[in-house]
């Protein structure tokens, strides 16, 4: 790779172009970084809920930035204001940029009006992680849940987002589902917009 | 061509993140305060209209150069995104980078 084409060196990050650049990041580098992040947070907290919250906060920061960047790159600075559109945006565009492909499915919850679910057979961040039995229901997908929450909140749709394992018969590893529960005001606004 | 202009970036909570005088007239002390006061008053009106965004760019101007203003905003928006992408930047805090300041003023001279 060295000497293939001398990339222009920019003195300051503000001068660098915002365009795509090289799309791929090494998976092992990411897995390593993510595992270090989880381990570091494990030393800082006493219980699982706190650990999940910290991962989610890390994801939130990523989500906020991803939203700004994608709106600028892909949509020419137009942002979605309808609920279904923003969910579609997350489920296809955001997932494709972050994980290389669209999410497996997007569903509307049946029990409550304000719940939606994005499911994935094997979440990229969970691929190299195994949860020991004594950690119970802990899910590193909390990081991805944080990303989704970051995108939604900064787009004006406050929501509570969590990640859950859903066991499927016939498969060894359970499916991961991101559950999105929108705040009251979002639904009211949607009803007003018709 | 004398033109006065004052540019402000305001965050979601109404706190200004960045301000700059970009006019080409010599600036007097009280004039600068007056500009900021006008911009704050305009903020209420704008906030009623724009509820989806989380940052607002505002420019006080007395010229009629619509296209120039639009391209100025687009370029500053790009600069803002680059600042925002910094993982160590807390969204909503003041932008203190002198490089950013220099670039905004250069863009203002170019477009306005």
Image (tube, coloured by chain):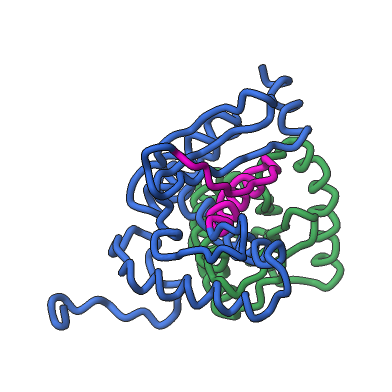
Residue B112 appears in the figure: no
Q: Which residues are magenta?
A: A141-168
Q: Please state if A147 lies on the left or on the right of A129 as rendered.
A: right
Q: Quadrant of residue A18?
A: bottom left
Nearer to me, B98 or B72 = B98
Colour blue, chain: A
**Residue at the top extreme, as displayed:** A194
Q: Is residue B90 above or below residue A147?
A: below
Q: Is residue A103 above or below residue A145?
A: above
Q: Where residue A189 appears, x then y in whole percent?
A: 73, 27
Residue A101 appears in the figure: yes
Q: Residue at x 63, y 48 (%)?
A: A162
Q: Is residue A193 magenta?
A: no
Q: Residue at x 70, y 75 (%)?
A: A45
Q: Please state if A184 lies on the left or on the right of B81 as rendered.
A: right
Q: Quadrant of residue A112?
A: top right
User: Quadrant of the image for the C terminus of chain B?
Assistant: bottom right
Q: Residue at x 54, y 40 (%)?
A: A79
Nearer to me, A134 or B67 = A134
User: Quadrant of the image for the N terminus of chain B?
Assistant: bottom right
Q: Is residue B96 above or below residue A75?
A: below
Colour green, chain: B
């Amino acid at each position: 790779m060295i000497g293939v084409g001398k990339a222009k060196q920019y003195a300051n990050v503000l001068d660098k172009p915002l365009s795509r650049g090289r799309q791929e990041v090494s998976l092992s580098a990411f897995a390593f970084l993510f595992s270090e992040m989880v381990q570091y947070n494990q030393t800082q907290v006493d219980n699982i809920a706190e650990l999940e919250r910290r991962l989610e906060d890390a994801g939130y920061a990523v989500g906020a930035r991803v939203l700004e960047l994608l709106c600028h790159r892909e949509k020419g600075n137009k942002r979605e204001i309808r609920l279904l559109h923003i969910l579609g945006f997350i489920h296809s565009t955001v997932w494709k940029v972050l994980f290389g492909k669209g999410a497996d499915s997007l569903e509307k919850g049946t029990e409550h009006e304000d719940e939606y679910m994005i499911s994935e057979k094997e979440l990229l961040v969970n691929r190299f992680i195994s949860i020991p039995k004594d950690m119970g229901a802990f899910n590193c997908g909390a990081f991805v849940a944080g990303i989704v929450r970051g995108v939604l909140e900064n787009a004006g749709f406050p929501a509570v987002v969590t990640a859950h394992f859903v066991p499927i018969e016939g498969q060894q590893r359970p499916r991961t589902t991101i559950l999105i529960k929108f705040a009251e005001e979002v639904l009211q606004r949607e009803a007003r917009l018709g | 061509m004398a033109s006065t202009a004052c540019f402000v970036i305001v965050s979601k909570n109404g706190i200004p993140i960045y301000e700059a005088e970009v006019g080409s007239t010599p600036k007097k002390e009280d004039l600068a305060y007056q500009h900021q006061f006008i911009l704050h008053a305009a903020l209420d009106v704008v906030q009623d209209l724009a509820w989806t965004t989380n940052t607002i760019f505002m420019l006080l101007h007395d010229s009629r150069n619509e296209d120039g203003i639009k391209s100025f905003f687009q370029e500053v928006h790009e600069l803002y995104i680059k600042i925002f992408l910094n993982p160590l930047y807390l969204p909503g805090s003041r932008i203190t980078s002198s490089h950013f300041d220099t670039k905004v003023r250069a863009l203002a001279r170019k477009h306005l």
